[in-house]
Image: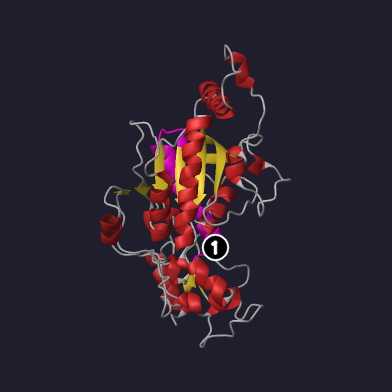
Amino acid sequence: MLSSVLLWVLAASGLFSLSVADSSKTPSSYINYTTVTGYFLQDEPSTNASTFNFMTTNFGLINRTYPADTTLHSHHNLTQWQRFKHQVTQLNREAPRGTEYKLLYMGRHGDGYHNDAQAYYGTPAWNCYYSELDGNSTVTWSDAHLSALGVSQALAVNEFWASEIKDQKIPTPQSYYTSPLTRCLQTANYTFNGLDLPARHPFIPLVKEYFREGISGHTCDRRSNETYIHDLFPSYTIEPGFTQDDELWVALHGETSTDQAVRSKRVLDSVFSTDGSTYISITSHSGEIGSILSVLGHQAFGLSTGAAIPVLVKAQTIGGASATTALQPYTALCTCTSPPAVTATTSVCAYPPAETSPGI
């Protein structure tokens, strides 16, 4: 076990925090994010996330009129998505300087072997013991791959997208981003490959480190090296500065939820400050998408494996420095020295105060 002194030393060096990428200069402006509600059922407090099916509800797009409808010569023959696209175009056209609107399609990876292992062993036993292993005699769950179920979930979403493109004329993503973890790399490929996409906006995702899952001591959250990622999907683009090995994951330690929110804000800032696209796809994880939703001011909305959520985002660039949050060193996870009973139904070994089991 690392001593507390060593933890702080490592934190200062960047190993246990995300401070390495920080600039020493005070920024002259910052981006403020808000969710524009009233367009999707997932925005509504009355929508039950545990039973909601985005594939049977037109992605959750609410059947309604828009202010921009009045600028159309005729909207009777247009689909809801075509009118929504016109509404977003009008919002951006009328937005003051420094304000823009983007639609984020955020999809959670399909079922992975780590999900199956957690279901098999039970969450208490998984959190305190099995999640720290690379796998068992049957499967490997470190940087977990999709299970057969996960592949079928992603292919179902692919069919859904194909239908939405053909029948609803949904605006397809103009840019694609993915977590570097294998289950997301695979999910993005199964979801978007082979679709009828515009030639000017092909499916060539950018792998971004900070779209990864909450960094925990679980081996499923440890990514593979850059060479592996490139060899697995050579058509994918890997962001500049991406390290060969995973320098953020540390055994038996994890980032705090507060620091994950800081990381989520930074990756959004990176996308919004460099990407002029209005429609953006992000393939990520339950915990990370939840963190992003929090940064965007969206209500909590849990996603099952393979599910997706669209969020209309208003981004305002504001002059001056934003309030800063001091980053903390990773916290040590409480673990078990031997396998607990698989039948355990309560926490065998609690996480540190104010922390919860990482999303997977």
The magenta-colored residue range is: 255-279
* SS state under label 1: loop
Residue at (56, 22) in percent of width and height: 78
Work out whether residue 351 can be spotted.
no
Coordinates of residue 246 in the picture (x, y in percent): 35, 64
> Which of 113/274 is in front?
113
Q: Position of residue 156 (x, y in %)?
A: 49, 49
- The quarter holding residue 147 reads bottom left
From the viewer's perspective, is residue 90 above or below residue 152? Answer: above
Q: Which residue is mark 1?
A: 359
| Residue 264: in magenta span | yes
Q: Give the residue type at disc 1.
A: Gly
> In the image shown, does 209 or 324 lie closer to the viewer?
209
Magenta stretch: includes residue 117: no
Q: How many marks?
A: 1
Residue 258 visible to the viewer: yes
The relative height of residue 342 versus residue 46 in the rendered view (above or below) is below
11 and 173: which is toward the camera: 173
Q: Quadrant of the N terminus?
A: bottom left
What residue is at 37 percent from the left and 66 percent from the top?
13
